[in-house]
Image (cartoon, rainbow, N blue to C red):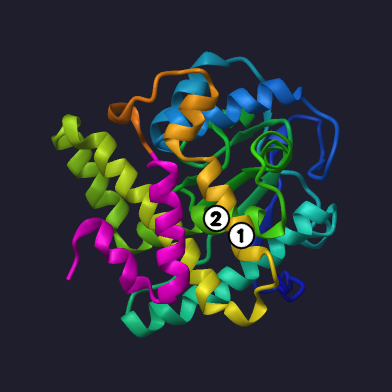
Amino acid sequence: MRLKRFDTSNIKVRSSGSGGRGVSIGKGGGIGIGTLILAAIAYFVFGADPMQTIGTIENAQQGTSVQSQSSISEEDICSSSAYATEACNALQSLNQTWEPEFRRAGIKFQQPVLDLYRDGRVTTQGCGSATSAAGPFYCPADQGIYIDTSFYDVMARQMGAGGDFARYYVIAHEYGHHIQNLTGLANQVRSAQQQNQRMANQLQVRMELQADCYAGVWAGKNRNLIEPGDMEEGLAAASAIGDDTLQRNAGQRVSPESFTHGTSAQRVDALRRGMKAADDSACDVYFDIG
C-alpha cells in the first residue's frame, strides 16, 4: 500500500517498554518465537477485552520495573525501523481518513496515541500493565493503540500472514476500537456485558467484527493506494486469526461458546464488507443500527 511518509506534527506516537530497553522496535532479537505464538493465541482466543486481561497480566507479574515512555522524539521513534515507519505512515493515513467522517457526523474527534514497543512490558494510563502476551490492543482509558512489533514476525512466520497490508490491518483494526470508543459504543457494549454475562462473548465478537469492518472501510476509502496483492494479504491475515483457526492450530477443540473475535470466515467477511462499501454505515450491521 503506497502510504505517504509520516509527518509527526499530524500524529501522536510514543514508545514504551520495560526499563532500560530503550527503543528496539524493528526486526530480530527478543523473546523466543514459541512464546510469541502462545502470546498471539492468548490474545486472539482468550484476550477479548484489554480492560480485563491486562489487569490479570499485571497482577501475575507484580514487582517488574516499568518504564512508561522513552524520552526519544516522535521522529526518532517513527524512523527507528521499517516496522515503526510503516506504523506511523498508517496512523497518519487513518487519522486523515477518519477525522472528516467524525466532522461530518458532528462527533468530536481525538487522535489516538500509537505506542510501539518490542519484546517488553508496557504500562498504560488506565488499563494497567501488560507484556507481549497481551498482543496488539487498544486502551480506551488513554486512547492508546499498543503494538508489540514482535507480533508481526509471528504473523509472517507462523500464521502465513505476512506483507505490509497485513500489518496495516492490525493497526486499522485497533483503530476501529478507537472509533467505537469515541462514538460511545464501547461503553454501551461494556455495560451490556456486565448486565448480561451470558451474552458477554457474543457482544465482544460483534465488537471485534465491527473493528475488522472499520479496518476494511479505511482500505476502501484509500483504494487508489492499494497495490496488487494487498487485499489478499489482508484477507489472509483476517483468516489466520479467526477463533476457530487459532483453536484448531493450538490442538484445541473448536469451542464456539468461547469465541471472542469471530471465526475466520466471519473476520474475512467483515473486512471484505468494509473494503467493498468504503462506508462506515456498512459496519452498523453488527449491532443492528439504523
- The disc at residue 235 is 2
Amino acid found under the numbered disc labelled 1? Glu
Q: Which residue is drawn at 77% across and 52% down?
A: 83
Q: Does the magenta stretch include residue 38?
A: no
Q: What residue type is labelled 2?
A: Leu
| Dots 1, 2 in contact, CB < 8 A | yes
Q: Compared to 257, does 160 lie above or below?
A: below
Magenta segment's dominant SS is helix
Q: In this view, does 6 lie above or below 33?
A: below
| Residue 236 seen | yes
Residue drawn at point x = 55 percent, y = 55 percent: 235
Residue numbers of the magenta segment: 261-290
Which of the image's four quarters has the C terminus?
bottom left
In the rendered image, the residue lying farthest to the left is 195
The image position of residue 230, as x and y in percent, is 65, 64
Q: Which residue is drawn at 59% across and 45% down?
A: 146
Q: In the rendering, at what x and y percent does residue 52 appear?
A: 39, 30
Q: Name the residue under label 1.
A: 232
In-front residue for pair 49/258: 258
* x then y, percent, for residue 264: 45, 43
Residue 262 is a magenta residue: yes
Q: Which residue appears at 80% of the width and 62% of the height?
A: 75
Question: In the image shown, does 17 or 283 lie closer to the viewer?
Answer: 283
Mark 1–mark 2 Cα distance, whole angstroms, equals 5 Å
| Quadrant position of residue 1 | bottom right
Image quarter for residue 199? top left
